[in-house]
Amino acid sequence: MRNLTLATLTALVARCAATWPHPHPPKDLPPVTSEALQALISLDQLESGAQQLQSIADAAGGNRVFGSKGHNDTVYFLYDTLLATGYYDVELQEFIELFSGGTASLSINGEVQDANIFTYDSSGSASASLVAVDNLGYEVADYSTEVSGNVALISRGECPFALKAANAATAGAAGAIIYNNVPGPNIAGTFTEPGDYAPAVSVTQEDGEALLAQLEAGTPVTVELEVNAVLENRTTFNVIAETKGGDHENVIALGAHTDSVEKGPGINDDGSGTIGILTVALALTKFAVTNAVRFGFWTAEEFGLKGSEHYVSTINQTAGEITKIRAYLNFDMIASPNYAYFIYDGDGSSFNLTGPPGSDAIEADFQAFYVSVGENYSATAFDGRSDYGPFLENNIPSGGLFTGAEDIKTAEEVEQFGGTADEPYDSNYHQAGDTIANLAWDAFLLNTKAIANSIALYATDLSKIPPVTSTTPAKRAWYPSRELTASGPRKARTALAEKRSVSRKRHTGCKKGHAVAI
Ligand SMILES: *[C@@H]1O[C@H](CO)[C@@H](O)[C@H](O)[C@H]1NC(C)=O
Ligand SMILES: *[C@@H]1O[C@H](CO)[C@@H](O)[C@H](O)[C@H]1NC(C)=O
Ligand SMILES: *[C@@H]1O[C@H](CO)[C@@H](O)[C@H](O)[C@H]1NC(C)=O
Ligand SMILES: *[C@@H]1O[C@H](CO)[C@@H](O)[C@H](O)[C@H]1NC(C)=O
Ligand SMILES: *[C@@H]1O[C@H](CO)[C@@H](O)[C@H](O)[C@H]1NC(C)=O
Ligand SMILES: [Zn+2]
């Protein structure tokens, strides 16, 4: 792929800004149909697209985190590919976003141990004794005076990580180790925003409980801990491509995020969604559409939906631009290695989080697709934890597909979808192992065809989806971020009751005045 210089890029941005939007409907193309569009989706294209992203990551130190070379090259690849079709008006939407990253290290009694940094962590180092913190560390009173100058050992649960790390700082801790409260790999948690935190690292439940047992047995534990946090403003880009043809007053939008986490190349999360919608975009160029189709390739999703939030915030509400988006479809992880076919629960029948009117029809159309190919499907909570969140906030009917992240596949789901019970849907979620070898190609192909089916339907006929009349959404339960947070893993939770109790605890169990958002 062509390596754009800054000057070329600036020229491109200027050119497309000047010509956007610029409808030149291509002539003599046949009207799109689901069957014809699906027939143009092939495994070869998905493989070469995924390989493109893998090569970009490999050439950039192994990741595609926003603002990095790996992410910039991903964005330029998408921009160039879409522009070259001549079928789309393509925009590189530039903005500045706060980046947080860095490294952490930990040794216990001189032995190096696996430890993760938190997003928005504070830098610092400590060489001191380990002191267990009572309860879950959400009140300063839980921190004994012994914590001062030492390293606090705190369990995950009930309250934001940030509150615990802030309390540790208040108690004078030189550092903090926060251990998981559920089994599984070491988490990559977030503090949500910069603050006054003790330098903190996360360890697994197993490692944390072993440390606690030593302290309870009266064995002294010496800790060497170091956090080198990077916090900087970075320039980054969304890529937005809209068909030149079709009715621009009635737009069907869809999106996927282009960034990975810093730990790995992110080929399933969300290379799969990125390449899935790109492949549909390229196939669509062979057809005429009735309604315009707008593809959003969002940056910085892993930092809290920043790209999609930025895009939605820049749409001119005065001119009614936002309500021209008749529906938004999101695709974040569609080829998980131990997959299930999850559909966002737009009608609220499974999770009682109903989307704006029309979301039910979007869900039903995805269901009908899986029925038509003889596959099972299940529901995933429509809780705003991916890039559809900002669209839901504006009352835009939404939907999408998901094949599962770090949550554990049940025996019942193995009957429905095959795969392995008691293992995560994606055991490489947010890890270095999320490479091209981490994809379930059958799910990738089928889900890309499912995207093609919905796009062909809505590019032709939006009558099932009511127009957006108000951008004020109906009141609904709301989760502000999809990132790993205080109480447990995100996504595909099956028990509504459990979710409600978690949400209640967040509000009553945390000390007031420490309003650190989860
Ligand atoms: C990515 O692109 C931005 C905007 O042009 C630039 O400021 C930044 O230096 C680039 N990052 C790398 C690592 O090249
Ligand atoms: C990022 O930019 C904002 C807005 O200009 C500024 O307030 C903030 O201090 C910057 N942060 C860093 C880490 O440079
Ligand atoms: C938004 O749209 C209104 C009405 O068309 C127009 O007057 C205004 O200049 C637009 N604002 C921006 C920021 O483009
Ligand atoms: C679903 O949510 C609504 C509104 O939040 C609430 O009134 C209703 O009791 C909930 N239903 C169930 C079964 O939890
Ligand atoms: C769908 O799920 C049922 C169990 O609920 C199972 O018997 C059937 O084989 C599954 N179908 C497919 C195509 O996997
Ligand atoms: Zn993702």
Image (cartoon, grey):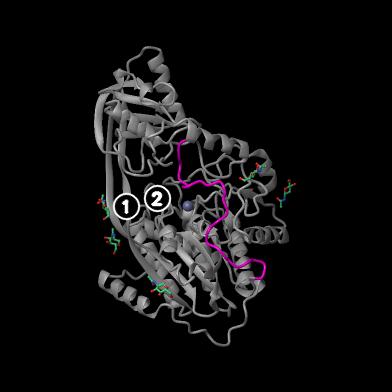
| Image-based side of 244 in relation to 347, left or right | left
Residue 94 point in image, percent of width and height: 34, 65
The answer to whether the residue labelled 2 contacts the one labelled 1, judged by CB atoms less than 8 Å apart, is yes
Q: Is residue 479 magenta?
A: yes
Q: Is mark 1 within 8 Å of ligand 2?
A: yes
Q: Residue furthest bottom?
A: 28
Gap between marks 2 and 1 measured at Cα = 9 Å
**Residue 445 vertical position relative to residue 84 in the rendered view, above or below:** above
| Residue at mark 1 | 98
| Image-based side of 419 in relation to 16, left or right | right
The image quarter containing residue 466 is bottom right
Mark 1, other Cα within 10 Å: few <14 / some 14–19 / many ≥20: some
| Residue sitting nearer the eye, 91 or 501 | 501
The residue range painted magenta reads: 463-487
Mark 2, other Cα within 10 Å: few <14 / some 14–19 / many ≥20: many
In which quadrant is the C terminus drawn?
top left
Ligand 1 falls in quadrant: bottom left
